[in-house]
Amino acid sequence: MDMKEEVEELCKLHRSFRPGQAAAELAALSKSIRSKQRKAHFQGIDGTLIASLTHLLGEQQLGSYQAAVAGDVDHFQSEVKDTGWGCGWRNIQMVCSHLLRHDKEMAQALFHGCGFVPDLLSLQAWLECAWKGGFDTAGGDMLGNAAQHSDQWIGTTECAALLRFFGLKAQIIDFTGGLKNPNIQTNKDGEEVHMGVACDGCGVCPIVGPRYNSQVVINHDLCDQCHALPDSDSVAPFRRVQNQSAPHSKSGVTTDPKLADRNQQGTLPHLRLMEWVWNYFVDSSTESDTQHDKSSTRAGAVHAQPSKQDSGSSHWRGQEEDQSRKQQRTDGHKQQTAPSSSPSPSSRHVIIKTGKPPLYFQHEGHSRTIIGIERYKPTQGRAKRQADSNATSGNEGYLYNLLLLDPSHKTKDLVAALKSGRGWQKLFKQGISDLKSQQYQLLYVDDGVLHGPELEDWKVLKATETY
């Protein structure tokens, strides 16, 4: 029996599995699939990619500079066989390269504990298994429930289904760029109708009128009446979900509808994306690292890592600091990064090694992996004139750049740029003027692994947040 046949048999068992039934057969087939997986090949970067990039970030001469970077991650480039369609799979490999390295529980769950990042064919087999196991069946139907030997594009939903199949809390964030949400319609009375969304309080479906989404409980929505009840405080705070076709203030409140076209062509929608990414990497870090950043806008901050409180952040940072100390002993020199002790309040150049997982970054036609973000305030005079034109001004006048890994780039080119210190900005940085698409999606993996009945609530995919 070949690998595909075994995956098919495993899926049949998984679909019909009930507690106490076929557990031995399921475990045996899982072990067999694990043994038949093939390891993906990639080119390693001496000193680790993140450490080399962090060193170059530290050498930049920018005013009031701050950066936050993810934990170690490997770069997986597209090969000839998957050029033009394989970027989604390569980004899954990059995200998993971090998770396998930095979290023992996730490493044991992912790919049934094989301990390595599988190749594309193996990932495709697992995605089919996830579909047949009930994860994102609607998405599976759209792709004919066939992924192996296929050159179909995949995105955040396929990545989420694959990771959730192994119990990982993969969650999706939508950034609509000011476009109206197609699932929110307007009735004859001018009220918003949230199609397909039920109130978790009274059960009415669809919700008509204001809809409130809990920022601490996943997929928990309330209608206006239930939101007004005292019991709703137990799942507060809430974000009001509404169509957003006009400009918005930093707090998400619609301002002047007459300027809607300016909003859709301007930078504010994508500024929210930048601020969300910044908050994702920074908000759950230790207080000593983020004491300079309390004024940053909190768009998306509450739900960026909902279960990573102090213990979670110390888990990720502890892993990263262990890696950093080992690297310093090996290299024999100190990296130019933020020290483990609290930076001075007067410090103007701070780099935070968060240890966080990277983000899967999707837009129409391509996807990449976000491994960090930088922000700074341009100085006066010559330095200000030379400020990166790709960045954009955010809260308190900061300019932002995403730090990215692109699977379409060759790893050897990244290595050469990191070693020489020349041309690396073009390969790794992207500012808001380069974000040409109207809509973007992010996928992040929250802390912890789900087991048994907990998985049932994670089989249907929808965005955790929409901006």
Image: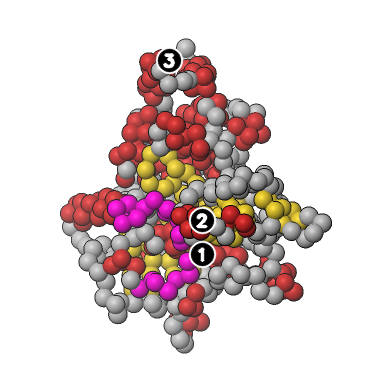
Residue 297 in the magenta stretch? The answer is yes
Q: Amino acid at mark 1?
A: Ala
Q: Position of residue 181 (x, y in %)?
A: 68, 55
Position of residue 387 relative to residue 147, above or below, is below
Q: Amino acid at mark 2?
A: Ser
Q: Please report whichever mark, 3 or 1, sits nearer to the chain's N-terminal start.
A: 3
| Inter-mark Cα distance, 3 to 1 | 46 Å
Q: Amino acid at mark 3?
A: Ala
- x 49%, y 29%: residue: 126
Please tell me the numbered disc located at residue 22: 3
Residues tagged 3 and 1 counted as in contact (Cβ below 8 A)? no
Q: Which residues are magenta?
A: 292-313
User: Is residue 67 shown to the viewer in this render?
Assistant: yes
| Left or right: 460 as drawn, with respect to 67 | right
- Look at the image and tell me in which quarter the C terminus lies: bottom right
- x 44%, y 32%: residue: 453
Q: Viewer-proximal residue, 80 or 190?
A: 190
- x 48%, y 82%: residue: 384
Q: Viewer-proximal residue, 59 or 4?
A: 4
- x 39%, y 66%: residue: 67
Label the magenta part by its dominant secondary structure.
Answer: loop
| Left or right: 193 as drawn, with respect to 81 | right
Query: Which residue is under mark 2?
Result: 232
Query: Which residue is under mark 1?
Result: 299
Residue 66 in the magenta stretch? The answer is no
Position of residue 162 relative to residue 376, above or below, is above
Mark 2, Cα crowd under 10 Å, few <14 / some 14-19 / many 20+, is some
